Amino acid sequence: AGIFTYDPGFTSTASCESDITFIDGDEGVLLYRGYPIDQLAAKSSFLEVCYLLLYGELPSQQQMEKFRHTISHHTMVHEQLAAFYRGFRRDAHPMAVLTGVVGALSAFYHDSTDITDPAQRELACVRLVAKIPTIAAMAYRYSTGHPFVYPLNKLGYTENFLRMCFSYPTEEYEVNPVLAKALDTIFILHADHEQNASTSTVRLAGSSGANPFACIAAGIACLWGPAHGGANEAALKMLETIGTVDRIPEFIKRAKDKNDPFRLMGFGHRVYKNYDPRAKAMQIQAHAVLDELGLHNDPLLKVAMELERIALQDDYFIEKKLYPNIDFYSGITLKALGFPVSMFTALFALARTVGWIGQWKEMLEDPHQKIGRPRQIYTGAKPREYVAIDKR
Ligand code: CMC
């Protein structure tokens, strides 16, 4: 017995208290620890944002140096982990590989199983933030059949990641600072987003006291879906399908047609009923990358900008409060940076790892923490007597 509140999709249930991220969907506001996302995107770095999300304050110069040093000394992965990759088929999706490999880290770090020890919790956070670029780059290199590249710790976090993805032992590699800045900003924009599906998954998995690496693997699995992290891939494919500016009205018409399942990918959001503040910063980076690469006449960018302009003047989109979200411009940018579409969600996972593990840590330090155990509204059969198989 018991009467429970039924809230499918948890649209009006708060599952926790959190000090980390604030969203006002009506006003289009996103704050990390109180700092507006546009300021962080313009002025901060991803590693500094990691510090902010994990420890609650922006670091002093000295704290930042120490953090950078700590992270850079945990960028390597165990050599046996490389062998683990080789068990996957070459054509495995990078998200399948990431789910498996990050889960496997729990077998390499048995010490992390003692989550009651604050030093071990801290170490799990550092290890994850430090190793996830190495692990994601290895997933990419494995898919292309190219040799793994070891981290080079004198480089910055994102520069190092780009080098691990795109450098070859046969030639010199210089990181382009404009492209590195763009990717670093993309990481900032994806770092946390309060209790979205994957973060809630990490918290729920962690609430039983499970190994943190296993919890993050659960988050990666959840992020993979097209309604969550997979939308950037879908938005790029849509822009490619539309192809030219003259075909936009046809697709706008389809998006408005109730009998047509087509939706404008990269438009609309469960929480934002205003311009997604991340989309603005993303648009700035899209322009920076395409200008740097001499691709400002990119037909996809033209389609995207014109589509946005037309949709924002259309009554349907105005009435339903449908605005571009973060995924609208991210696909164009990531493609220009040289990443295949299959890596887009893996890059999201890389950036969100700090949010996931920060929320995991916060949960374990919360004195009200309990195992997550939702109830249900039972709709099945009434009690009945068992019937032997020969009598059915
Ligand atoms: N194009 C056309 N119509 C839309 C769209 C769209 N992109 N999004 C919502 N609508 C309409 C929808 O048909 C519905 O109309 P009606 O009330 O007449 O039935 C109304 O707007 C409300 O939509 P909903 O699906 O009930 O809203 P939701 O909060 O459940 O869904 C959403 C939010 C993001 C899943 C949805 O807007 C969507 O499918 N957008 C396209 C996919 C996308 O860009 N997803 C990325 C989300 S941001 C990344 C992340 O956080 O992981």
Image: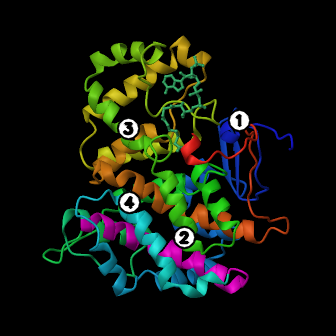
Mark 1 and mark 3 residues within 8 Å of each other at the beta carbon: no
Which disc is residue 96 wearing? Answer: 4
Query: Separation of disc 2 and disc 4 at Cα?
Result: 14 Å
Say which element carries label 1.
loop
Name which residue type carries label 3: Ala
4 or 1: mark nearer the eye: 1
Mark 4 lies on a secondary structure that is helix
Amino acid, disc 4: Ala
Q: Is mark 2 within 8 Å of ligand 1?
A: no
Instruction: Tell me the quarter of the picture where residue 29 sits.
Output: top right
Q: Is residue 301 visible?
A: no
Q: Residue 119 colored magenta? A: yes
SS assignment for the magenta stretch, majority? helix
Residue 99 found in image quarter: bottom left
Q: Which residue is mark 1?
A: 379
Q: Is residue 27 above or below residue 171?
A: above
Give the residue number, with chain letter if any, for mark 3: 234
Q: Is mark 1 within 8 Å of ligand 1?
A: no
- The kind of residue on which mark 1 rests is Thr
Amino acid of disc 2: Ala
Q: How is the image coloured?
A: rainbow
